[in-house]
Image (cartoon, rainbow, N blue to C red):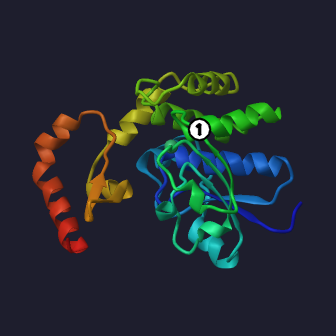
Amino acid sequence: MSIQKTLIISYPNPDLDGYACSFAYAELLNKTNKNAVGVAFGTPYVEVQYVLNNFEINPLASGEDILLKNKNCSVIFLDESSVSHLPPNISPDQVVEIIDHHMANEEEKFVNAKKQIEAVGSCATLVAERFAQSGLRPSREAVILLYGAIVSSTVNFKNKVTTERDKVMADWLLTLIDLPDDFVKNLFLSKSAVGDDLEQILYSDMKVVELARVKVCIFQLEISGVEKLLENRKDEIMSILKKNQERACF
Ligand SMILES: [Mn+2]
């Protein structure tokens, strides 16, 4: 075992793709005797909670807690390669490796990192490929998370970012375990179950971009039945956006 611990991270409040990659890549590195620990910052997205709870998977350690004891450690950054998406208190110089599928990125700012950035539908596809190439078998937990991430990121292979590589890896993962027939349906339902936590869900996937010196906040909600939500809760959504606008002092 190498002495130095490497943190395997994605962005704060990760979705299933970022979370699955952190979980599975840490596992792969551990299986090859590297001292890596997968962590999650903030509050993982609702679909992550669904998969963890339903398949009795132990959650990743809290990134904030582990970072306190491992300041300035090496970091592997997954499913992102922009500096603004790094968790607080981690500098781009600490990042030694990046695996990502976002072609709009700031990879040049990570000067110490070796990088694999390829346009596939899900970063989990790239991590699954690493497992497949290694000849090592991922755990049941890693398989469920990686498969769920590919399905979720590609909207069950329907959205235009989907590639053949995503399908090949999803099929390979399915050969390793038996999943319930309603896995995909329930995964998407879990994303659509918006209750009292509407504001929290909106903020968990908020991005700020600057367009012609104007800051624009983009909230994203991936659900089925969006018309119904807008019909029932439009006022609530507008008041959340208004509150955000006031807070940001535009
Ligand atoms: Mn992703």
Residue positioned 80% across, 60% down in the render: 35
For the residue pair 160 and 178, the one nearer the viewer reads as 160
Q: Is residue 28 visible?
A: yes
Is residue 57 visible in the rendered image? The answer is: no
| Residue 79 higher or lower than 227, as above or below | below
Q: Is residue 33 above or below residue 166?
A: below
Q: Residue at x 17, y 36 (%)?
A: 228
Total tally of numbered discs in the picture: 1
Q: Position of residue 245 (x, y in %)?
A: 19, 67
* x and y percentages locating residue 122 in the rendered image: 53, 37
Which amino acid lies under the numbered mark 1 shown in the image of this protein? Glu
Q: At 75% across and 31% down in the image, what residue appears?
A: 132
Name the residue: 65% across, 28% down.
173
In the rendered view, would you say 154 is above or below 108? above
Disc 1, SS:
loop
Is residue 69 left or right of 223 when viewed as pictured?
Answer: right
Residue 125, given in percent of the width and then of the height, sits at 61, 34
Quarter of the image with the C terminus in it: bottom left
Above or below residue 73? Residue 110 is above
